[in-house]
Image: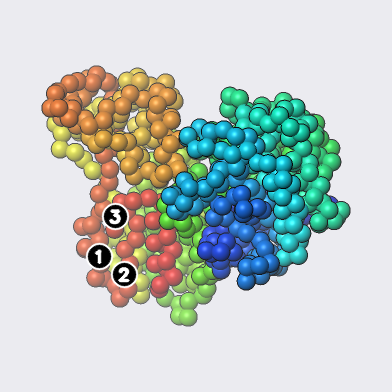
Amino acid sequence: MDNKYPLLTSPIVLGRVTFRNRMFSAPMGATDITADCSLGPRSVGFYELRAKGGAAAVTVSELVVHPETDASHMLHLDLATPGNLASHAYTADAICRHGAVPSIELSHSGQYAGTYLADRKLQASLCQYGPSDGVRPDGTPVKGLTGEQIQDIVQAYGEKAGLAKRAGYGMVMVHGGHGWLLNQFLSPYFNHRTDEYGGSLENRTRIVREVLKEIRKNVGSDFPIEFRMSGSEMFDGGYGLEEGCRIAEAIQDDVDLVHVSAGSYQFGFFHTHLPMFAPHGENVGLAAEIKKHVNKPVATIGAINDPQMMEDILESGKADVIYMARELLADPFLPQKVEAGKEEEIVHCLRCFTCMAERKATGTRRCSVNPLVGREAEGMEVTPAPRKKKVLVAGGGVAGLEAAITAARRGHTVKLYEKTDQLGGILKGEQAIPFKKEMYELGLTLGRSARKEGVQVFLNQAVTPSLVREEAPDALILAVGSTPLVPPLPGIHGENVIFVNNLYLEEGKVGDTVIVLGGGLAGCECAVHLSQKGKKVHLVEMGDMLAPDCNIRHRPALMQKIGEGVTVHLNTVGQEVRGNGLVIKNADGMEGFIKAGTVICAVGQKANRADVVALRETAPFVREVGDCVRPANITKAVYEGYHAALDI
């Protein structure tokens, strides 16, 4: 077989451990952490799936090394808690049995202890320890660690590494980036000590060097140690790339892999976790520069999801290992698909932050495009149905495609009818917006997968009761979607009005000054896109906040972009569309006028319930999925489509 990615698929040796390829699964927090900070049963499946998908290393995250000074509700590893060591052994074994190397991230939150505690009152009551006495940017007091406490923490890193090896982990990753404790010591912004742990770079790196030497003493010379660092802290007062290179030089003799990330927890979440507005691989340059200064292999990370980009990074010598986190949530089997030359089947991460938002909102895991995430323990395989049935799917959007693919994988005979000339549903409209490219491509990828699985696809044909009677299916999946809401405004059907779903068809009509009517997620993202194209954009929203339908992780990035170039009108109602703009009324009842050549209508969607009602009693088994139930999001559509097919 012709291998398009010879470097990406080649093994690498760290210590005396051989890793089967250069695609590593980055640290991601456990799905279910028990009250006593052990790995719960769902976490075993969560990490196992990434190993099963072909990643060379799978990193379990985060292990708190010194609970006495870091009361974060993250993983512990000790011999005193019944079942704790065993939970790690089962997890490491689940990763190892699929040919991947299990790794675990050793961490201390420092002055951000308790970040992941659900009990905010308890978090506020914690003593926050850092390199120096001070006050956090949010006003929380910080107490400087004593020399004795530092030595206890150094020893704890070694002890936990030794226990990790005993549990079956094949590598440890020492977290020295992102604003956690070791990074706080490295940072001139946080570290104001005047003893041997502060001041000069040699002193600021001292604790890291001591930690790494203590770990080596506990794990032996052949066991790989990885150090994760921020190549640059990327904020005023923190260290930049030049000093990042010097830090890497200072620690390289004690590690087998230098893992270069970016940013700091308090100041740079979107440097560490690149949003959809940032270029893929934006942080690769940090790793590339550091690699020039060290003689150990270097890993890079940061929204890298394209195999060709990965191969180019390796070929150009910018890095030796590619780490992925969110991309391996979206498609755990990306490494296998790369190995098999099936990169066109990769489901790409949307960078929508659903995974992180769900963790914060409910303490669970979910992914917009992968219905298995967080639920791997319930089954990782689509099992064959006991009896082959005839399935008809009405609608070729995300929900319908996911249902059709899953039903076909179960062995059913599946026909899918789509009333338009293209699959993808509402995602067709996303091709107009470059930073939502992956959303548009999701529809294309699912369409290819459906045909590959044997689904018979019929375009330009709506499903009617007579068609259902003619086909006589055993099961009917209704995924007939939604329709744009049309506000009852005079002039709303004028030549200067474009409905946001049709922007990709009519963008050439957009004038230099644009009004986006509707400040939900779709309207906000449309406004950002047009602003980035140099348009003067007014965003009109009748409520008192923008994008209430946006998740809590994506929203700050979106609001930042809105603030860069969009004029916002909250508590403002459109009254009439005119050829040269929009008549508005504010909360005080005062009328005004916004002059613009184009009005984009983005006030929401309504479920196609009439289509559902006409079809809901035409087959023995009928299930409604996606926007035709209630307009929502990709996450809901994928999840409902997948499980509807499992129920047949």
Q: Secondary structure at mark 1?
A: helix
Labelled disc at residue 615? 1
Q: Residues within 10 Å of mark 3 (few under 14, many from 20)?
A: some
Q: Is residue 498 left or right of residue 370?
A: left
Identify the residue under disc 2. Answer: 622
Q: Is residue 456 left or right of residue 496?
A: right
The alpha-carbon separation of the residues under discs 2 and 3 comes to 17 Å
Tag nearer the camera, 1 or 3: 3
Q: Is residue 196 visible?
A: yes
Query: Quick one: 58 or 225, which is closer to the camera?
Result: 225
Residue 381: image quadrant is bottom right
Q: Residues within 10 Å of mark 1 (few under 14, many from 20)?
A: many
**Which residue is drawn at the image coordinates 23% and 28% (left, top)?**
495
Query: Quick one: 108 or 376, which is closer to the camera?
Result: 108
Identify the residue under disc 3. Answer: 630
Query: Quick one: 628 or 20, which is closer to the camera?
Result: 20
x, y percent for residue 578: 18, 24
Tag nearer the camera, 2 or 3: 3
Q: Classify 356 as above or below 270.
A: below
**Which residue is drawn at the image coordinates 59% and 50% (left, top)?**
70
Residue 604: image quadrant is top left
Q: Quadrant of the N terminus?
A: bottom right
User: Which amino acid, by three-letter code, is at mark 1?
Assistant: Leu
Q: Classify 405 as above or below 207.
A: below
Q: Earlier in the sequence, mark 1 or mark 3?
A: 1
For the residues labelled 1 and 2, say whether their Cβ atoms are less than 8 Å apart: yes
x, y percent for residue 63: 64, 55
User: Which amino acid, by three-letter code, is at mark 3?
Assistant: Arg
Q: Earlier in the sequence, mark 2 or mark 3?
A: 2
For the residues labelled 2 and 3, say whether their Cβ atoms are less than 8 Å apart: no
